[in-house]
Image (cartoon, grey):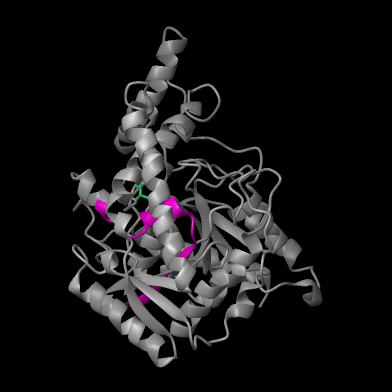
Amino acid sequence: ITIADLTKEAYDRVDKLDDDVQAFLALNKEKATATAAELDKVPFEERGPLFGLPIGVKDNIVTEGLETTCASKILQGFNPIYDATVVNKLREAGMVTIGKLNMDEFAMGSSNENSAYKTTKNPWALDRVPGGSSGASAAAVAAGEVPFSLGSDTGGSIRQPASYCGVVGMKPTYGRVSRFGLVAFASSLDQIGPITRNVTDNALLLEAISGLDPHDSTSADVEVPNFAAALTGDVKGLRIAVPKEYLGEGVSEAVRQSVLDALKVLENLGATWEEVSLPHSKYALATYYILSSSEASSNLSRFDGIRYGFRAENVQNLMELYKETRSQGFGDEVKRRIMLGTYSLSAGTYDAYYKKAQQVRTLIKEDYDKVLADYDVIVGPTAPTPAFKIGENVEDPLTMYANDILTIPINLAGVPAISIPCGFENGLPLGLQIIGNYFDESTIYRVAHAYE
Ligand code: GLN
């Protein structure tokens, strides 16, 4: 089989399935076909493990000459003049970018219903959401349109969709992967990560995209291990912490049971587990929405109608141009966050909201530090329930926000976490979340692989 065949096969799958799944916003067919022909000339001895394999990329990661919209009207027609660092790394690994994947607008949401273009469907049940914001990144992999994708995770956006779609999604340690070329939502929380069908693929892809980048001062100067080498199957003596806050109120009985069953499997393999407490978890949602919205209000100020994409017409002066462009270009959820963030950062409210939230963030991080000093990993569910119905939560932002209650604290702490499939509720997949220590994705992969 040639890379040209593989690439064509991916587009055939997209042709066949995407009318139903609605995952892709843009396809890269001409360029991908040309790339594949070039890759076919490379001698076998020079090919790495991901060489020639197709991948889909979330639409908030910039791709040179390929429209990048963040699923927002305000970026309609924006063709970046450079590739994100991760996209360069995919190229170095010999991967073929098939196209750009739908998302919630600017990665704000949990269902893909906040896309300005379309709502991606969950391949397991087309009347259900795929999760979000990297919903299409998970759905495209689950449907078999592409075997690999990249998502981004600010408060759960890789893990929650992975859980809803029955695939493997990793949010790496903050700083593990360069954010250069990732359109910023909340810069202190955002991380790019891999979504795949199994743990081995995930480990290989994370290795390929990781590493220090001079273009991103928050990328970390730490060694990138051969993550796949950690997949030994051996978890004897491993110490697992199970936070009681993760199996409490709001978590469905089937979800709870699936986690307890997974712990049994790991116990049978020689691991032990104990209940612990992360007492500040109850403040995580409020803290996250203050901090992420504050950062978003600042990050999104660059979309002014002058520099990128869409520009409002029939305006009389510059102020009106800004105002009209932003009023017409941003969707409701994005506006809601900009207002919340601007308010939290204002002189009169800064101390009560933004500063307070920063202090609570430290307490949440310390909860994780304490537990991870005594245990190798923390295990719990990824989401409190399986995928909900399209339309079910759109009128109710607070219920929508509560979906990420189990993933958000991990971003606030900055530690890595994976979601892997661990069972079903009414035929819909559930996810097991495994959380590790800073830059110790290897242990997470080892546990995930042993369980898988
Ligand atoms: N659903 C959360 C939000 O709406 C998380 C999004 C994300 O991780 N990008 O902010």
Which corner quadrant of the image does residue 166 belong to?
bottom left
Residue 267, compared with residue 133, is above or below; it is below
Residue displayed at 21% across by 59% down: 389
Position of residue 52 measured from the top left corner of the image (x, y, whole percent): 66, 68
Residue displayed at 65% across by 50% down: 85
Residue 255, compared with residue 290, is above or below; it is below
The N terminus lies in quadrant: bottom right
Q: Is residue 108 left or right of residue 204?
A: left
Position of residue 446 measured from the top left corner of the image (x, y, whole percent): 53, 79
258, 201: nearer the viewer: 258
Furthest residue in direction top, as rendered: 316
Say if the magenta span includes residue 412.
yes
333, 176: nearer the viewer: 176
The C terminus lies in quadrant: bottom left
Residue displayed at 65% across by 70% down: 50
Q: Is residue 450 visible?
A: yes
Q: Is residue 370 left or right of residue 250?
A: right
215, 51: nearer the viewer: 215
Give the total of numbered labels. Answer: 0
Q: Is residue 101 left or right of residue 405?
A: right
Q: Which residues are magenta?
A: 402-423
Say if the magenta span includes residue 35.
no
Residue 351, compared with residue 159, is above or below; it is above
Position of residue 274 measured from the top left corner of the image (x, y, whole percent): 34, 78
Q: Is residue 331 visible?
A: no
Position of residue 109 measured from the top left corner of the image (x, y, whole percent): 34, 48
